[in-house]
Image (cartoon, rainbow, N blue to C red):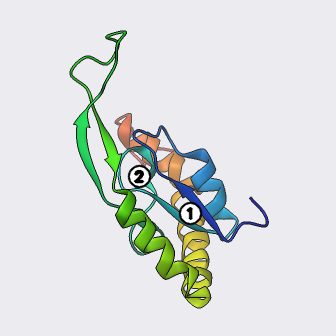
Amino acid sequence: NAKADVVLSLHRSEGFGLVLAQAMAAGKTVVATGWSGNVDFMTKADSVLVDYALVRVRDRQGFYRGGLWAEPDIEDAAAKLKVLLGDPDRRRDLGRRAQAAIALKLDPGAIGRQARVWLGHDLAEP
């Protein structure tokens, strides 16, 4: 990850997206499917989000019956990667934006305050 210029994740479904968050924290340009848990912290301002189509999960075991996942648009991903390949300044700018954004979004204090709101605690309480 340290020597990479770009981290790519063409996923159908992503939990939190730890590798993506770590890459952003390291100032890397991240290109990922614009669907699932990663969009809780990735935006078009700090990352490259790949188009997708929602499709039914193909699951022979039946665990995800009726579920949907994203089918990333490979052509869109290739076009966006091609632009990044030819524009190192844009890659560096996105990496800086990603690093700043993730530092704010994943700040432990901010996460703690949000958790208190989710749990219904009055933030004015000590």
- Residue position for label 2: 40
User: Who's the residue at 40% across and 41% down the image?
Assistant: 12
Please say whether residue 11 is visible from this viewpoint: yes
Between 25 and 55, which is closer to the camera in this rendering? 55
User: Who's the residue at 41% across and 38% down the image?
Assistant: 13
- Residue position for label 1: 102
Q: What amino acid is at disc 2?
A: Asp
Above or below, 19 relative to 45: above
**Whole-percent x and y of residue 47?**
47, 69
Please say whether residue 46 is visible from this viewpoint: no
Q: What amino acid is at disc 1?
A: Ile
User: Who's the residue at 33% across and 45% down the image?
Assistant: 71
**Whole-percent x and y of residue 63?**
35, 13
Q: Quadrant of residue 25?
A: bottom right
User: Who's the residue at 47% across and 81% down the image?
Assistant: 83
Q: Residues within 10 Å of mark 2 (few under 14, many from 20)?
A: few
Q: Quadrant of residue 56?
A: top left
Between 111 and 92, which is closer to the camera in this rendering? 92
Q: Residue furthest right?
A: 3
**111 left or right of 19 in image:** left
**Whole-percent x and y of residue 126?**
52, 45
